[in-house]
Amino acid sequence: GDGSEEDSVPPAGGHETEIEALPGAHVVTVDSRGVPSFLAGDLGAVEAKSDPHEVDLGKSLEVIAPVFNASPEGLVLKKAQSDNIGDQHFRYRQVKNGREVLGGEIVVHVRKGVIYAANGRARDDLDAPMSPVIDTSAAIEAALDATKARHHDAKDDSLDSEIEASEGTVCQGEETRP
């Protein structure tokens, strides 16, 4: 690759078994660690329903999720919708240790009962602590440093309210080390 986070090269190894479980699928892109981030082709079939909320993708996720190094048990349906040409799209968010993983999601695309694509980044092979590893003030300091948002007034509780509202989330990132 060109140093970008995703390349159009299939993974060098480790995912052959999962891909074999989806013989009609091919890897379109992989992330910087060689984990597929986009699959296309015939990824299986589901019972077609006019209301996407009635479609059961459970068995299909058991086959698709491991290709992304994700656990189907850690995926929770966030949104199901039909587009203007009748395709249905199912967005699953990742939850690990009871917390939503920011950036961790898989989107499954269905056309007339056939799963034709899946994409996302929901990695179950990266560690997520059971409890916070830094205290709140250190997290605020790190966030302010990272965003250069130094204008926060210590007397202003709005940032603290936003942080409290977001408790229970963890972040999905390439820099995460097990």
Image: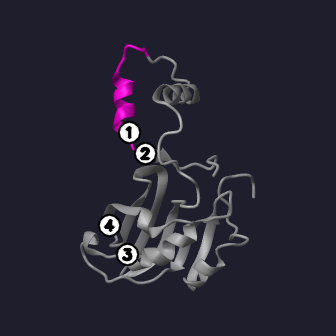
134 over 102 or under it: above or below: above
Q: Amino acid at mark 1?
A: Ser
Q: Are marks 4 and 3 in contact (CB under 8 Å)?
A: no
The front one of 134 and 66 is 134
Label 4 or label 3, whichever comes before in sequence order: 3
Q: Are marks 2 and 1 in contact (CB under 8 Å)?
A: yes
Q: CA distance from mark 2 to mark 1?
A: 6 Å
x, y percent for residue 31? 64, 59
Label 4 or label 1, whichever comes before in sequence order: 4
Left of 178 or right of it: where is 120?
A: left
Query: Local crowd at mark 3 within 10 Å, few (<14), some, or many (≥20)?
Result: few
Label 3 or label 2, whichever comes before in sequence order: 3
Q: Amino acid at mark 2?
A: Thr
**Picture residue at 73% right of the left edge, 71% below the top:** 12
Q: CA distance from mark 3 to mark 2?
A: 24 Å
Residue 58, numbered label: 3
Secondary structure beneath label 4:
loop
Q: Are marks 3 and 1 in contact (CB under 8 Å)?
A: no
Residue position for label 1: 166
Query: Local crowd at mark 4 within 10 Å, few (<14), some, or many (≥20)?
Result: few
Q: Which residues are magenta?
A: 153-169
Residue 35, numbered label: none
Question: Closer to the camera: disc 4 or disc 3?
Answer: 3
Residue position for label 2: 169
x, y percent for residue 35? 63, 64
The front one of 92 and 178 is 178
x, y percent for residue 85? 34, 71
Secondary structure beneath label 1:
helix
Residue position for label 4: 84
